[in-house]
Amino acid sequence: IEDEQDLPRPPPPDFQANNRPKSGSKTPLTPNDVHYGKTLGEGSFSRVVLGTHRRTGQQYAVKIIDKNYLIRMKKKETALAEKNALVQLGAGHPGIVRLYLSYQDAYSLYFVLDYAPNGELQTLLTRLGSLCLPCVRHYTAQIIDAIDYVHQKHVIHRDLKPENLLLDEDFRLKLTDFGTSKVLDPSGEQRKSTFVGTPQYMCPELLESSTTGPSSDLWALGCIIFRMITGRFAFNGLSDYLTMQKIKQMDYSFPEGVDGHAKDLIQKLLVPNPSERLGAGTSGSNNDIQALRSHPFLVSIKWDTLWTDEVPARE
Ligand code: ADE
């Protein structure tokens, strides 16, 4: 690209900081407090670099989004969606990447986020193949707890996948990348959507009727549990088209030896009708999120200490 910016670089003095940190923090973080270091990851129109607070040494992940690219690719909504969702979610949950500060200069948008030093769940899965049962159970519970919070805040993530689940210093999960998320107006559940996600984790309603709702995230959860436990995709064809065909036809099967309760849970999430997925009912109904939390696969989970208990060894 001809005018590719030479990032990272410190913001010029004319930056506009437009998102004050949440109440409770002592000194407000400002763009010039942060030293911009090595690149942690690169997307098609963004780069994530390691940010270090010059005085305290506190580390952050700074997502730097190229404005030119956003405008050229008509992706302004993506950046806005991400910021709106992160602002809406606030500092309220340990399983969600927190936005500390956002600002912009003439070239880029900057999001200062929680840094997750152990990378993506995806990388761990690639390295280990599958995860052991206690670990799958713990991560399943952490994902449920995080998406319950997200949904309570009227946000749908819509692109849940192991690449968007980061691992913090203690290998606890942190949900990230709200670029395709949607902040719901309190009225509507299912919404028309132009969004196209990652094929392997896409829900049938998106393929059939271009709608998504909170229970689209529950479908993705089913695909993620399948992936963690078997090391394989639930739905995967030789092309994206064939993957989507498999999803529409519910063409998936379990390998030998999958834990019975885990299998049952996956089967109750990978249900074509969004309202019939386990946990999809409204609060207080017999299919609400509590029904999902109480599934036999998760009986040994201590929900009160889910984010302080040690994560079982990854093996
Ligand atoms: N890559 C993308 N976002 C990240 C984050 N928050 N922490 C570490 N690496 C990342």
Image (tube, helix red, strand yellow):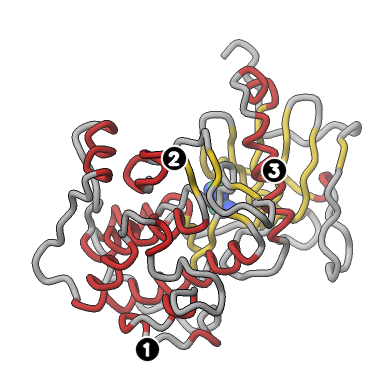
Mark 3 highlights which residue?
36
| Residue occupying image coordinates x 82% and y 45% | 31
| Residue occupying image coordinates x 41% and y 57% | 274
Task: Identify the element where label 2 is drawn.
Answer: loop
Q: Which amino acid lies under the numbered mark 1 shown in the image of this protein?
A: Ser
Q: Which amino acid lies under the numbered mark 2 shown in the image of this protein?
A: Gly
Left or right: residue 49 versus residue 286 is right
Residue 143 can be seen, yes or no: no
Seen from the viewer's position, the closer of residues 6 and 293 is 293
Q: Which mark is residue 197?
A: 2
Seen from the viewer's position, the closer of residues 89 and 132 is 89
Which numbered disc, 3 or 1, marks the residue that appears first in the sequence?
3
Left or right: residue 209 versus residue 314 is right
Task: Identify the element where label 1 is drawn.
Answer: loop
Seen from the viewer's position, the closer of residues 52 and 87 is 87
Image quarter of residue 314: bottom left
Which of pointers 3 and 2 indicates the residue nearer the eye? Answer: 2
Where does the image place residue 192, in percent across and percent down from the top left?
54, 39
Image quarter of residue 287: bottom left
| Residue occupying image coordinates x 34% and y 64% | 269
> Do the residues bearing badges 1 and 2 touch, measured as CB atoms within 8 Å?
no
Kindly report the distance in space between the C-alpha atoms of the residues bearing marks 3 and 2: 30 Å
Kindly report the distance in space between the C-alpha atoms of the residues bearing marks 1 and 2: 33 Å
Up/down of 291 relative to 38, above or below: below
Which of pointers 1 and 2 indicates the residue nearer the eye? Answer: 2
Where does the image place residue 237, in percent across and percent down from the top left?
20, 38
> Do the residues bearing badges 3 and 2 touch, measured as CB atoms within 8 Å?
no
User: Quarter holding the N terminus?
Assistant: top right
Up/down of 123 relative to 208, above or below: below
Up/down of 170 relative to 273, above or below: below
Mark 1 highlights which residue?
300
Tally of numbered tags: 3
